[in-house]
């Protein structure tokens, strides 16, 4: 055991987490801060939440804290609530070194991980060395059984144990590796990285609901662009979004997704709200458009094709990541409005700007243009329209009708020229 006397800045540690640790140790239990919060404190970052590890069993923790409840299907963890702040307390668990028929599937995944263990076992069952550091508040010591401190100093993400086994036990660790790479700007240790290239298929066995939760963390934690790049580099993207991956080489999909994530990252940096609906609209726009095209070529009319394509694409995607209805609805709205934005005569534009999803649809339109779609300056037109007074709006609408007329006239003229050229050879 290598003890380390790096004192962590007490003022950055949540008062509530301190309270929880003190109460547990006061009752004679062992309790430590652990995981991401210790890692982030060492890196001089502010942790987003605090986890506590203890030898007290969940029922014992519950007895000590009235403001607590047990959560988790996979593991039983106690949430202790202080207003809006929650401290997670987990009992030491074992590492599942041997593949046990009752707790593992044939491919080695953990089915029942709710088995308590010793402090040592708890350290080794964690994913990366940088996430297996424990902080003893009383002695101000970091306990590091896995050389995590060295890895943090070297900006290195390293799985504890044998990477292939650890990924087989829980394939989501591959996504976590890339998420931390993007968030911390660390590199993956050689084997921690190389194994991912050939194990991505294991993600197919993870329940879509868990993958969806993970996708939110991947794309909505402020480092979406870097995460996307890592997912493409390590060949994981296609296992989560197969229909998108298939159209990526022949469309502007990658550009569009990149821009959507960049905009999401910017919004998060500025404390502005973000929604998965917008990101999923970008992720699945080209699969949707391609399917709609296919249906229209088969003779299906626009409205119906659009409806059916959305249902197909969302239905397919839900085999991989769930998409709760509260997001798939707004996502369809964003798509459908794309076909209404070009229609600008009469009162249509005034009505459209009052649509509850207009703003998102307009933002989406701007991204489509920025990604390289040729849309005849439609985005600029809507920008102008929103800023214009009634008179200027009338003029803007005239422009579009004028342009149409001009185009029609040009067409007529050239037909006429062609015809006259035919009838009157020079
Ligand atoms: P974040 O900053 O995103 O909260 P974190 O490291 O705290 O990062 P959590 O998902 O909050 O991540 O998990 C807390 C700790 O639990 C991790 O640091 C790690 O030690 C352990 N852990 C989480 N998920 C896994 C997993 N799939 N396999 C093994 N250990 C895990
Ligand atoms: Mg955490």
Image (cartoon, rainbow, N blue to C red):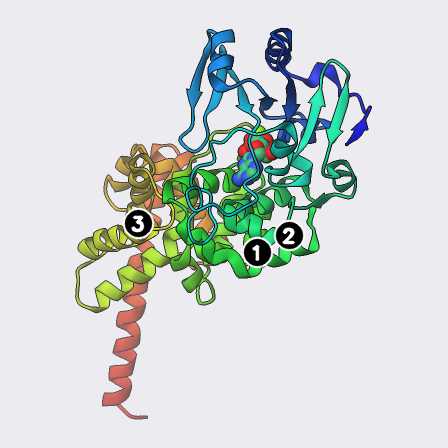
SS state under label 2: helix
Q: Quadrant of the N terminus?
A: top right
Q: Quadrant of ligand 1?
A: top right
Q: Is residue 384 visible?
A: no
Q: Residue furthest right?
A: 5
Between circles 3 and 2, the one closer to the viewer is 2
- Give the number of the disc on residue 213: none
Q: Which residue is mark 3?
A: 314
Judge the density around disc 1: few (<14), some (14-19), many (≥20) Cα neighbours within 10 Å: many
SS state under label 3: helix
Describe residue 381's horizontal placement relative to residue 130 as left or right: left
Q: Residue furthest bottom?
A: 426
The mark that comes first in sequence, 3 or 2, is 2
Pick the residue in front: 347 or 7. 7
x 59%, y 20%: residue: 54
x 56%, y 60%: residue: 197
Callout 1 touching callout 2 (CB < 8 Å): yes
Q: Which residue is mark 2?
A: 192
Judge the density around disc 3: few (<14), some (14-19), many (≥20) Cα neighbours within 10 Å: many
């Amino acid at each position: 055991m290598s003890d380390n006397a790096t004192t962590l800045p007490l003022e950055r540690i949540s008062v509530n987490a301190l309270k929880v640790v003190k109460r547990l140790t006061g009752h004679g239990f062992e309790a430590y801060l652990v995981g991401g919060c210790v890692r982030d404190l060492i890196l001089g970052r502010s942790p987003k939440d605090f986890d506590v590890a203890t030898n007290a069993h969940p029922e014992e923790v519950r007895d000590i804290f009235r403001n607590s409840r047990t959560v988790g299907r996979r593991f039983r963890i106690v949430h202790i609530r202080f207003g809006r702040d929650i401290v997670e307390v987990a009992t030491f668990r074992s590492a599942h070194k041997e593949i046990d028929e009752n707790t593992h599937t044939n491919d080695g995944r953990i089915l029942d991980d709710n088995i308590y263990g010793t402090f040592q076992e708890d350290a080794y069952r964690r994913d990366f060395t940088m996430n297996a550091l424990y902080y003893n508040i009383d002695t101000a010591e970091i306990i590091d059984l896995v050389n995590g401190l060295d890895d943090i100093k070297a900006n290195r993400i390293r799985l504890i144990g044998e990477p292939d086994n650890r990924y087989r036990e829980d394939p989501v660790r591959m996504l976590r590796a890339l998420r931390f790479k993007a968030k911390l700007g660390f590199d993956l240790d050689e084997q921690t990285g190389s194994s991912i290239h050939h194990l991505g298929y294991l993600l197919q066995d993870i329940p879509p609901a868990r993958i969806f939760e993970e996708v939110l963390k991947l794309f909505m934690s402020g480092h979406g662009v870097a995460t996307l790049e890592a997912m493409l580099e390590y060949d994981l993207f296609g296992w989560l979004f197969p229909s998108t991956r298939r159209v990526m080489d022949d469309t502007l999909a990658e550009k569009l997704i990149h821009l959507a994530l960049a905009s999401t990252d910017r919004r998060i940096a500025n404390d502005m709200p973000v929604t998965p609906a917008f990101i999923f609209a970008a992720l699945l726009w080209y699969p949707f458009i391609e399917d709609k095209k296919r249906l229209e070529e088969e003779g299906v009319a626009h409205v119906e094709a659009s409806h059916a394509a959305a249902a197909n694409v969302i239905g397919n995607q839900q085999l991989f990541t769930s998409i709760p209805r509260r997001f798939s609805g707004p996502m369809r709205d964003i798509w459908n409005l794309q076909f209404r934005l070009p229609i600008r005569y009469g009162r249509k534009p005034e009505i459209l700007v009052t649509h509850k999803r207009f703003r998102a649809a307009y933002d989406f339109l701007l991204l489509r243009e920025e990604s390289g779609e040729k849309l005849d300056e439609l985005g600029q037109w809507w920008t102008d329209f929103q800023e214009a007074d009634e008179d200027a709006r009338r003029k803007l609408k005239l422009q579009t009708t004028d342009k149409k007329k001009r185009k029609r006239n040009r067409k007529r003229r050239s037909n006429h020229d062609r015809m006259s050229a035919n009838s009157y050879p020079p």
